[in-house]
Every structure is written in structure tokens, then in C-alpha cells.
Image (cartoon, rainbow, N blue to C red):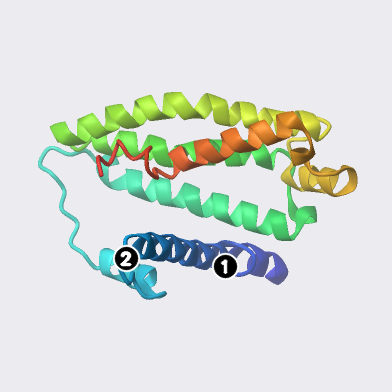
Amino acid sequence: MIKIFFNYLIFPGFLFSACVGLIAGWIDRKVTARIQWRVGPPWYQNFVDIVKLLGKETIVPAGAKITFLLSPVLGLLSTILVATILGVTVRLPLESFAGDLIVVLYLLIIPAIAIIIGASSSHNPLASVGASREMKLVLGYELPFILSIIVVIIKSAGSIQIGSILNHQINFGSNLASFSGILAFLVAIICMQAKLGFVPFDMSEAE
């Protein structure tokens, strides 16, 4: 029980994945700053931002529904679960469970749905515009992303267990060794860019 708790919550689960994500975000910001001839933030900036944002006052618009407050929590929890499942599975493939790939696919779409629900329940016309943009974006990238995952499933003897997919590639070679595998990888990378809301797929935030 203690080992399971450690694997899923400490390393290589939630805490480790969260730290890696924050450091990766800092690298992205640092590289962007260097390209723009700026110094960029220190390595601990993202950690400080979390403390700062958690300490801010929550302003609820008049007429907003309870889903306005629950949507960010729902999106955060789904992201935490994805990071935990992937962190444990990649490090310990034998710890994966049957159908975990399907679970991850469902969890990955929840943040986008949370944005749409939260914006729609805020009674703000600008937020409604952002929600409609997010819906169009989801309709655009979700199907190609699922198709790219189906390619991986087919090439891994029909397995929907992430650990089995990793073991299959270890024993029989990477999926990137084929044209369809490379094509699926490129499509998945572009779709993940859209899922993360990076440029040029940041139209819902209108940055």
C-alpha cells in the first residue's frame, strides 16, 4: 500500500509530474524570452505564480452558476489524473491497468469541456465568445487526435493498455519506424499543441 501511494502521489506520479511540468513551462518561457532578446523569468517563477494565484480573491460574476466555480477544479483534477497515470505507466509499465489509454483520452478532453462550461455559466458575453471558439477548436482537433491514437493501437496488436503498448514497441520496434507511425506522431503533436492552447491555437483566450 505504501509503495502504491508513493508511486502515484510522489514519484513518478503526481508530485514529480507537476514539478517536471512547471520546469518545462519555465524552459518554454525562457527560450521565448531569449528569442525576443529578453532575460526571461527565473527557474522558480512558475512555482511562485502558483502561490500568488492561489492567494488571489475569487470574484464571482453576478448571476453566475455554481459550475463557474466547479469547472476549473474539474479541469485541474483531470489534468492531475492524466499526469499521474502517464507518469506511473511510463516509469512502471507493469503498474498499468486494462483500458487506461481510453481513460486518458477521456480525461484529456475534460479541461476543454471545463473551459466551455465555466465560460458559458459566467453570464459574460466575452466569455461566451471564448466558449464558442473553444468548441470549434475541440471539434477540429479531437477527431484527428483520436485517429492518431487508433494508429498506435492497431500497430500494438490492438492493445488499449499503455504498458502493453510500450512493451510491444520495446520488443518489436518503435511505431515511428513506419510511414503511418510518423504521420500519426506528427498529427498527435499538432493536436496536443491545440489541446494545450499554444499559438496558433490560443483563440479561445484571444491572446
Q: Position of residue 56 (x, y in %)?
A: 21, 64
Q: Is residue 189 left or right of residue 1?
A: left
Q: Is residue 123 visible?
A: no
Marks 1 and 2, how far apart at CA: 31 Å
Q: To which residue does mark 1 refer?
A: 16
* Residue 149: quarter of image: top right
Q: Position of residue 184 (x, y in %)?
A: 65, 32
Q: Is residue 101 visible?
A: yes
Q: Residue at x 35, y 72 (%)?
A: 45
- Quick one: SS at disc 2? loop
Q: Position of residue 52 (x, y in %)?
A: 27, 69
Q: Position of residue 172 (x, y in %)?
A: 89, 42
Quadrant of the frame with the N terminus: bottom right
What amino acid type is highlighted by mark number 2? Trp
- Which of the two residues, 118 or 148, is positioned nearer the viewer here? 148
Q: Is residue 104 left or right of residue 157?
A: left
On residue 37, which mark appears? 2
Give above or below for 61 relative to 18.
above
Q: Earlier in the sequence, mark 1 or mark 2?
A: 1
Quadrant of the frame with the C terminus: top left
